[in-house]
């Protein structure tokens, strides 16, 4: 999976440059690879389409979002930022427990208590399904950018991906659904987005 990580970083750097992001912070989280055994951390473990005995996909990396959000919280503290934005989604997620809203709220509370600082974890995609996520990209005239220049493929293929892994199947089904039902899905996006609006 080292090659996939390199491709993912290259994709992120390219997007940051394209979007004129002034600060693109890359952190070394390789320690997680030593601790968490998963198809995403071990080259010898192929990505499976079947669930493991515990009901989770073998691409689940225990503690990944705990670590990511903790590091993002520390970085936000140093910057004086009061919000972290993450793209986790509970609506049609892949079964990862660390993508659920309850987990995010618990992490937000832990960060606020642990650093004694006002901090909000914002999850604009939490209650959107994949078709609505594509609609959101289209709403902001970024559908082609998201389709051709982002990477969700477990095998590290940018854009439409490998077409075989579970992440690619989920992404493609959402895109096909949106392209075939644009009007209805765009209308449903407005309703679903209300659930994700930050509380004052």
Image (cartoon, rainbow, N blue to C red):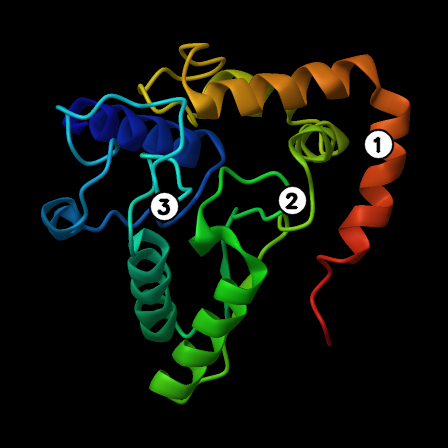
Name above or below for residue 99 compared with residue 73: above
Which is nearer the N-term, disc 1 or disc 3?
3
- Picture quadrant of residue 14: top left
Name above or below for residue 160 compared with residue 26: above
Residue 110: x and y in percent read 41, 79
User: Which residue shows up at 73% across the image and 76% down it?
Assistant: 200
**On the image, numbered disc 3 is attached to which residue?**
54
- SS at circle 1: helix
Mark 2, Cα crowd under 10 Å, few <14 / some 14-19 / many 20+, is some
Residue 102 badge: none
Could you give the CA–CA distance between mark 2 and mark 3, rounded to whole angstroms? Answer: 20 Å
Q: Is residue 122 left or right of residue 185?
A: left
Name above or below for residue 25 compared with residue 101: above
Q: Is residue 92 left or right of residue 159?
A: right
**On the image, numbered disc 2 is attached to which residue?**
91
Q: Is residue 31 left or right of residue 105?
A: left
């Amino acid at each position: 999976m080292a090659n996939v990580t390199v491709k993912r970083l290259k994709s992120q750097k390219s997007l940051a440059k394209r979007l004129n992001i002034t600060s693109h912070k890359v952190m070394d989280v390789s320690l997680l690879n030593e601790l968490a055994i998963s198809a995403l951390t071990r080259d010898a473990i192929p990505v499976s389409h079947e669930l493991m005995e515990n009901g989770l996909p073998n691409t689940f990396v225990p503690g990944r979002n705990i670590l990511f959000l903790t590091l993002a919280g520390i970085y936000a503290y140093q910057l004086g930022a009061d919000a972290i934005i993450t793209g986790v989604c509970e609506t049609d997620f892949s079964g990862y427990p660390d993508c659920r809203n309850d987990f995010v709220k618990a992490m937000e509370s832990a960060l606020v208590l642990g650093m004694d600082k006002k901090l909000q974890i914002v999850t604009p995609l939490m209650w959107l399904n994949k078709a609505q996520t594509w609609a959101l990209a289209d709403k902001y005239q970024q559908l082609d950018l998201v389709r051709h220049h982002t990477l969700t493929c477990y095998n590290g293929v940018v854009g439409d991906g490998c077409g075989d892994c579970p992440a690619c199947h989920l992404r493609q089904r959402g895109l096909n659904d949106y392209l075939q039902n644009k009007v209805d899905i765009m209308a449903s996006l407005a309703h679903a987005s209300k659930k994700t609006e930050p509380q004052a």
